[in-house]
Image (tube, rainbow, N blue to C red):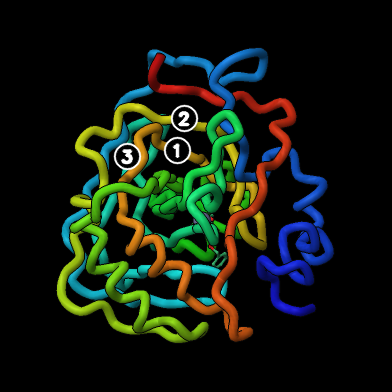
Amino acid sequence: MAPWGYSKENGPATWHKDCPIANTGVRQSPIDLITTGQTCAKYDSNLKPVIVSYPAFSEATFLNNGHSVQFQPSAGNLSELSGGPLTKKYKFEQFHFHWGNNDSEGSEHRVNGKMYPAELHLVHWNSESPNFSSFQEAVGSNDPHALCVLGFFLKVGAENASLKPITDLLSKVKNAGSSVSFPGKFDLKAVLPETLTDYYTYDGSLTTPPLAECVKWIVFKEPIEVSTAQMEAFRAVDDGHGKPITGNYRPPCPLHTRTVAASFK
Ligand SMILES: O=C(O)Cc1ccc(OCc2ccccc2)cc1
Ligand SMILES: [Zn+2]
């Protein structure tokens, strides 16, 4: 099967051919986060702030895999996640982005139908499970919360100095399949808002094949600002067929019987 992607020929509407769960799954991601009316997110006062411990990464690979750009630290990284809706400690695996061709599209999750120009995903796996001891095993484990992905919307505004080391590197991985070792240290903590208190959370899936339904999603309300130039840098990254990656976002999936919780009123 032609490798999956986001074009007409191999995009989200075709993924069911190799991943039936795309159409049969009842906890697929992303979703449209509705804040009013019947199926809206419900305030849960028990939801605590998310706690991240992200010491600056000293060794990492920055890769263009043809459907996104991904920052992956070496296996020994000690970055951890806990708190929020989680009962276990999760280990950081990688972060990557989803973006569009213009500022009115690009994010995977939506808020009342509104898309942001991009979305940052911080991928973690449950490091306290007796059933698996690596990210790859976690994805294949059928554990409903094997993974936790933190989603942050990106919006256009001031230049983001903390993300500049990443956006400045995009031209170096223009060709699909290319990767560079990240020069120097990268402080991911500095990219995130100070307080991680206001978020939506729900049970979902990977938003790319294999679309495994193993993700506790935590999507933060506050967007992260990046400049127009930084957004344009994403749009110059190639997909391996001589074209820029055009909108590597999956459209929203049905909620089915799921509920979305909000940590804020
Ligand atoms: O952030 C997302 O889009 C969800 C997501 C998270 C992780 C992910 O990993 C892909 C992958 C799956 C299995 C093995 C290796 C890599 C794919 C998608
Ligand atoms: Zn993603």
Q: CA distance from mark 2 to mark 3?
A: 16 Å
Q: Quadrant of residue 162?
A: bottom left
Q: Report helix, strand or loop for mark 1.
A: strand
Q: Quadrant of ligand 1?
A: bottom right
**Few, some or many C-alpha atoms within 10 Å of disc 3 (few <14, some 14-19, many ≥20)?**
some
Q: In the rendered structure, which disc, 2 or 3, sits on the residue that comes first in sequence?
A: 3
Q: In the image, is residue 56 above or below residue 158? A: below
Q: Which residue is mark 2?
A: 200
In the image, is 143 to the left or to the right of 69? right
How far across and how far down the image is residue 258, in percent? 66, 27
How far apart marks 2 and 1 lie (CA) works out to: 5 Å
Residue under label 3, please give it.
82
Q: Is mark 2 within 8 Å of ligand 1?
A: no
Quarter in which the C terminus is drawn = top left
Q: Residues within 10 Å of mark 1 (few under 14, many from 20)?
A: many
Q: Is residue 124 visible?
A: no
Image vertical order of residue 225 relative to residue 185, above or below = above
Label at residue 50: none
User: In the image, what residue occupies the spot 44% across and 70% down?
Assistant: 69
Q: Viewer-nearest of labels 2 and 3?
A: 2
Identify the residue shown where x is 44% and y is 82%.
174
Amino acid type indicated by mark 1: Val
In the picture of the structure, the residue carrying the numbered disc 1 is 219
